[in-house]
Image (spheres, coloured by chain):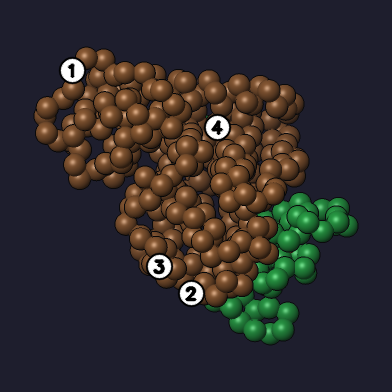
Amino acid sequence: MPKPRGPLSEWVVARLADSGAHPVGAAPLAHVTDDEAIALWSLHELSYRGFEDASDDAERDPEVLVVRHGLERALEQRLRARWDHAGTDVPEPAGVPDALEALVAADDGPSLADHVRRRADTDQVLEMLRQRSVYQLKEADPTTWVVPRLPTRAKAALMELQFDEYGGGNPNRLHAHLFAKGLESVGLRSEYGAYVDDALPETLELNNALSMFGMQRRLRGAAMGHLAAFEMTSSIPARKIAQGLGRLGLEGAMVGYYDEHVEADAVHEQLAARDICGTLAEDEPDQVGEILFGAFTCLDLESRVATALFDAWGVER
Amino acid sequence: MSEDFDHPDIVLEPHGPMLVRGASTIRDAEGTLHSVDRPVVALCRCDKSSRLPWCDGTHKVIPRRRTS
Ligand code: FES
């Protein structure tokens, strides 16, 4: 399990431990958002691969669920407040693909990909890859939760996209596996969750939002909007990152990973915006606002991670 | 009654690529044959991709001339 970052995550880690010696009393309040973020990340992880040193029963432990619920509620409120603050207009259902495109086009967050392409040094690139690994080693998984909650057209389209993410059935082409190979090729560790203790609070918040959108049926629209914005901002940055890796002599499997995403995501962005979000909006018009909220949240959280890294590196944005 | 849905094999995206489903090989403008190993591919229609015949997203950063 990850290293605790405060009283709340200490309680969570002790509670999840396989020892049976559960801490008594209610979960303490977190002192810092970092503490909250790692606590929620650990709780979500129970629904993915779990931890060797956590009890298998912990996922459904009622007291643990209460803590998870409280943390998710706080996270969702924070994300919605940012979305409300942005004040984006919500279109008619038929206008969703264009509205997604406009939202992405208007995004002026700092670009890690530009930095990697032109100026980043090797340490910075490795740091970015460590941060990304928290998600990329389970790439596409948070979105898979949503499949059974979608109407027919959006469900089929999501599967068409996910099938590609999972290598079309070939484990060697599964994207998370390509990323693991890429990590090894640049001398980093590739085991699942390897760099969670290095994850910035912004990285954890991004991962937590993605898991929360994926795991709650109520948030299916946000999950699909997030997917669309993610795919729509992937192919060009992937090409830039591949160029930057080449510039630094980091050739090999990691370049292959980003190359794969240039072509794959040029397809995925079309599927996500039109066949998934477009049809979902038509079939469930009450999801329009949610789709846009999810897309906004994707761009906003990516930009927060980029800002945090640039600040840590002392790079002007 | 449950309806039947459109699910074309080839889709021209507005201001974007051509999506092709279920292809196994593509011959590009130079005559080179490319094998396809994904269920759907995006073929560049703007001619500005750095990886022709595939779309690489570049169409989004060039001024629009197509009206499709
Ligand atoms: S159509 Fe996408 S790059 Fe040409």
- Secondary structure, mark 1, is loop
Which circle's residue, 1 or 2, is located before the other in the chain? 1
Tag 3: amino acid = Gly
Chain under label 3?
Answer: A
Disc 4 target residue: A222
Chain identifier of the green chain: B
> Residue, x 51% and y 38% (percent of image)?
A202
Q: Quadrant of residue A35?
A: top left
Mark 4 and mark 3 in contact (Cβ < 8 Å)?
Answer: no
In this rendering, the label closer to the viewer, 1 or 2: 1
In this rendering, the label closer to the viewer, 1 or 4: 1
Tag 4: amino acid = Ala
Disc 3 target residue: A187
Rounded to the nearest angstrom, the CA distance separating label 1 from label 3 is 42 Å
Chain under label 4?
Answer: A
Which circle's residue, 3 or 4, is located before the other in the chain? 3
Compared with A246, B67 (above or below) is above
Which circle's residue, 1 or 4, is located before the other in the chain? 1
Mark 4 surroundings: few (<14), some (14-19) or many (≥20) residues within 10 A: many
Which circle's residue, 2 or 3, is located before the other in the chain? 3
> Residue, x 47% and y 50% (percent of image)?
A131
Rounded to the nearest angstrom, the CA distance separating label 2 from label 4 is 35 Å
Rounded to the nearest angstrom, the CA distance separating label 3 from label 4 is 36 Å
Q: Are marks 2 and 4 on the same chain?
A: yes
Disc 2 target residue: A252
Q: Residue A130, how many percent across, how many down?
A: 45, 54
Q: Residue A274, how many percent across, how many down?
A: 64, 44
